[in-house]
Image: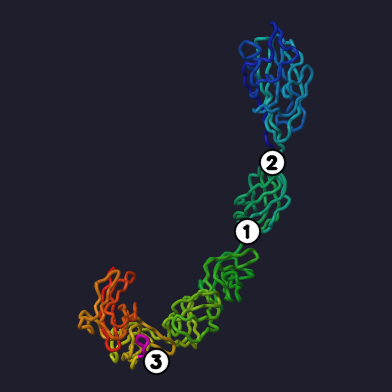
Amino acid sequence: MKKIVLSLFLSFVVFSVFNLLAPNAISEPSGGPAGNSGSPSDATTCAESCHGGSAVTQAGLITSNIPTAGYTPGSTYTITASVSGSGNKGFQVSPQNTSGTLLGSLIAGSGSKIVGIKYITHSSSKSSSTATWTFQWIAPAAGTGSVTFYGAFAITQNTTKKSTLVVNEAVVVVAPVITSFTPTNAASGTTVTITGTGFTGATAVKFGGTPASSFNVVNGTSIHAVVGAGASGDISVTTPAGTATKAGFVLVIPPTITQFTPIAAKSGETVTILGTNFTNASAVRFGGVNARAFTIQNDNLITASLANGATGDISVVTPNGTASLAGFTFLKTIKIKSFYPDSAKTNDTITIIGENFSEVLDVTFGSTAASSFTILNDTMILAAVGAGSTGDVGLSDKSGTVSAPGFVYLAVPRIGSFSPTTAKRDEVVTIYGNELLDVSNVLFGGQAANSFTVISNTQIEAHVGNGNSGNVTVVAPNGSDSKPGFIFGTSIGINQQGNTNGLLKAYPNPANNNIQIQIPISLTNSKIAIYNLLGEEIFSHEIAAQTNAIFIAINDWKAGSYIIRWNDQSTTLSSSFLKSN
């Protein structure tokens, strides 16, 4: 049982309840005014405002019949106020907390009365050597706690005393009782809910005599306790009022997995699992997927073969729990079911259909890597053909490679360069590139070559026909390719070949915003054209007969060298100029 102590706190201060009219008589023979008990909430005391003399203090002036274990809420008790001395005597008492709140309620007795609701005082002074007053106090509600009775006493006009009495609320202590617990079978680390009564203040919970690793008293009727090392047997709960026990707890010892090998496997392969407490295992799982079959070799060894499986934990399920260990990798077997189209050029997209594509690392066409690929989902890949070759479509992941035959690579010619970049009719231009074996036509500025010879897959020699400046183009059954920069006609150099008489001249040279081009006077209309060094026509204009000059605005042209070509029905001249910044 919790011991409750009735304490007297005594502090003596100067206090007077009454003004004395004369020696041996008090000024308030029928009771002092409220607010003079000497409590902390009273603003002043009669010891200061009503009486003179020095303050004295004395213990034990207030007593009661309240048990030492404390008051029972709502019960009625007798309070006695008593003071000794010569002369007329009076008192005032109030049960309060430190904030000045009345605790409980008062019932006046013989020779006393209530003033200001929370104060009880004498209704008539007493002159006997020991003056005593009794009154009733009804204890406050449960949970109030300690109550202090503050009392002030007057003996004649020069003597005042003060005393206090502190009483505590009685605490009823009930021995604990366990009515049930759940679950009845539990492993270490499992939370068990214990139900009963009298659990408040519990100091220990045990499973089979072994302390719980932790517990929480939810309220007086419920405890949540976590099983520690534990043992089968009784569950016990200990409180200051005693210990309650209940039989029937069974400590469950779950399985453990210490290792497995191999750490990665495919469907149909066998994995060996080592651990403890495997007897009576009911399931083995790989990444949450049940094994195809398993054998319990002994309490510490299981062999299991995979079904489809999944990457994740390996787990062993027994009646006493489930053991898991992370780190298993399921190796999916990729499979190609189909692909389309079955023929394509470089950078064309092929759709590949199959299974287990999520972890594909490489895609090839005829043993040449795809230029790029995207895994749309586990059953579809979109892949761009690289500079491939005819053969198998191949897919690889970390577990291996699979392939499907039937892909045809459609080669498209590619021009890397050509030489020379300037040529006349019937001159030979050598074209370098890739996939040139199937070239069926060669063009210069859009005009077919007179003839060409495919030397190899990377080289063609072509004779210029009635070409134009512009692109060199090669054409094959699967596509074509072009490269700019070809100039048809006489090569133009520093000496202005084809313009030896200086009849075609540009000035200023270099020029910035405008240029004037001097041309021969012709009896017929003529034409002038200007090309950049890539052979691209930048400007052209028909010129009337008898014209000897033309002005051109070039302020928005790029800086660099330009070629001028002029011709009429009988003559062609070439020249050049430089455009500055």
Q: Which of marks 2 and 1 is nearer the N terminus?
A: 1
- The stretch of residues the image draws in magenta is 440-448
Question: Looking at the rendering, which quadrant does residue 493 occupy?
Answer: bottom left
Q: In this image, 534 relative to 382: left or right?
A: left
Query: Marks 3 and 1, how far apart in space?
Result: 82 Å
Name the residue at the right extreme: 110
Q: Nearer the viewer, mark 3 or mark 2?
A: 3
Q: Is mark 2 on a helix, strand or loop?
A: loop
**Which numbered marker is on residue 241?**
2
Q: How packed is label 1: few (under 14 Cα within 10 Å), some, or many (20 or more)?
A: many
Q: Which amino acid does label 3 sit on?
A: Ser
The C terminus sits in image quarter: bottom left
Residue type of the residue flagged with mark 2: Ala
Decide which of tag 3 and tag 1 comes sooner along the chain: 1
Q: Mark 3 points at which residue?
A: 440
For marks 3 and 2 on the same chain, the one whose residue lies earlier in the sequence: 2
Q: Which percent across, then down, holds residue 224?
A: 65, 51
Secondary element type, mark 1: strand
Q: How is the image coloured?
A: rainbow
Residue at left 64%, top 63%? 320
Is residue 281 located in the magenta-colored stretch of the structure? Answer: no
Residue 73 % position (x, y): 74, 33
